[in-house]
Amino acid sequence: MTVHLNWFLPTGGDGRTLVDRRAYTDGGITRSRVTPVSGVRAPDIDYLIQIAKAAEQLGFEAVLTPTGTWCEDAWLTTVALAQHTERLKFLVAFRPGVISPVLAAQMAATYQRITRGRLLLNVVTGGDSTEQRRFGDHLDHDRRYSRTDEFLSVVRGVWGGKPFDFHGEHYDVEGGLTALPPDPLPEIFFGGSSPAAGPVAARHTDVYLTWGEPPEQVKQKIDWIRGLAEEQGRTVRFGIRLHTISRDSAAEAWATANRLLDDLDPDTIAAAQQALGRSESVGQQRMLALHGGSRDDLEISPNLWAGVGLVRGGAGTALVGSHADVADRIEEYHALGVEHFVLSGYPHLEEAYWFGEGVIPDLAARGLLPRIPASQLAGVPAANGRPASAPGGAPLLVAGGR
């Protein structure tokens, strides 16, 4: 079982800081500042193209896009980026409650034909009622998962190539049909830590995604979902969502993590923790429990740092260390049954190069990857604190500077 490496597209903005781009009144588009936050990058198409091309060159299989109020639409953005890449797949996040399942099935089929089979689907049920209501969705937490269950039943049904009927609590479909089903069928990624989420994952998902928790907690989740899937006569594969800070030495990596903390004053952390604490997501509450809102003792497991989760929702942990350290942790999760690693880092362009040129060759040498990605600059030593093939003049996260 080899490792599948995937990167992240920051369609909600990027930068050399953990402070969210919502610190800008316009979301960072024209950089009208509310607070003096430096190093924030707007998610314009030219920048996202750079990240997508870097991910493809470095050997990542796919890139994940987020979904929600504060990011660009994932379907439209990624189909545009597909025209600038050749092999890279796109793990498109979407909310099943705000789109017809028959339409979603048709969109996926069209996407597969346009991109020649490069679509993966990330189903986001939603753990924040305030966010859901912005999209006109007023169901409570557990009923949202019930609706997702029906949604995925309809999607898979209409992909069958003949009229499909479905009569449920949330959807009533007569003769639903995708005239030209997608080929291949997109793999479905899905996450959720609540009792309501587990059975949905067991029935429908191809890859169950968890946020980066310590290995023992991840093992418990894997055992839980695997057991539920076996009851359904299915096999589910597993993935994990993590940030990374990988450097030539552990000292450099931890200095970078500490530099990211320097941007976070107590008021910023307190406000973020208060907002995140209102989330109905069990996974989000598990992320918050890893650090308790404190900047102390953020290394919650060897090389697993919970600093990101002080101010950002969703995946709140990062693998921090030398390239070998990070490879060790990936190998440890892989031994538990994790195949897909969906990774990210701030900024996403530079961190892709640090990981791609530092960790990926190490993983390949361990036999966890089928090959070392070809690069025109392979073997060229790093210089001036920059990865060998990082874009000229692009500042990296280094100790004592930006």
Image (cartoon, rainbow, N blue to C red):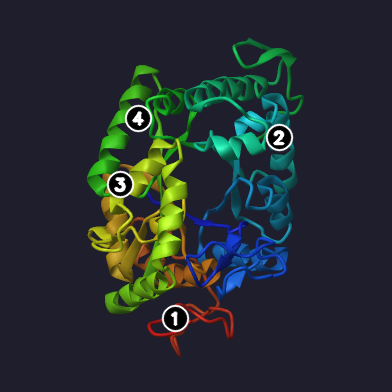
Q: Give me the residue at 59% from left, 70% from top.
A: 40
Q: State the CA–CA distance, disc 3 to disc 1.
A: 42 Å
Crowding near pointer 1: few (<14 within 10 Å), some, many (20+)?
Answer: few
Tell us which disc is closer to us: 1 or 4.
4
Residue picked out by circle 2: 109
First in sequence: mark 2 or mark 3? Answer: 2
Residue picked out by circle 4: 225
Q: State the CA–CA distance, disc 4 to disc 3.
A: 21 Å
Along the horizontal axis of the image, is 1 left or right of 113?
Answer: left
Tell us which disc is closer to us: 2 or 3.
3
Residue picked out by circle 1: 379
Tell us which disc is closer to us: 4 or 3.
3
Q: Percent position (x, y) of residue 330?
A: 32, 56
Along the horizontal axis of the image, is 330 left or right of 103?
Answer: left
In which quadrant of the rendered view does residue 137 lie?
Answer: top right
Quarter of the figure that contains the N terminus: top left
* Residue 314 visible in this rendered orientation of the protein: no
Disc 3 residue type (three-letter): Ala
Please say if the residues under marks 4 and 3 sit with CB atoms less than 8 Å apart: no
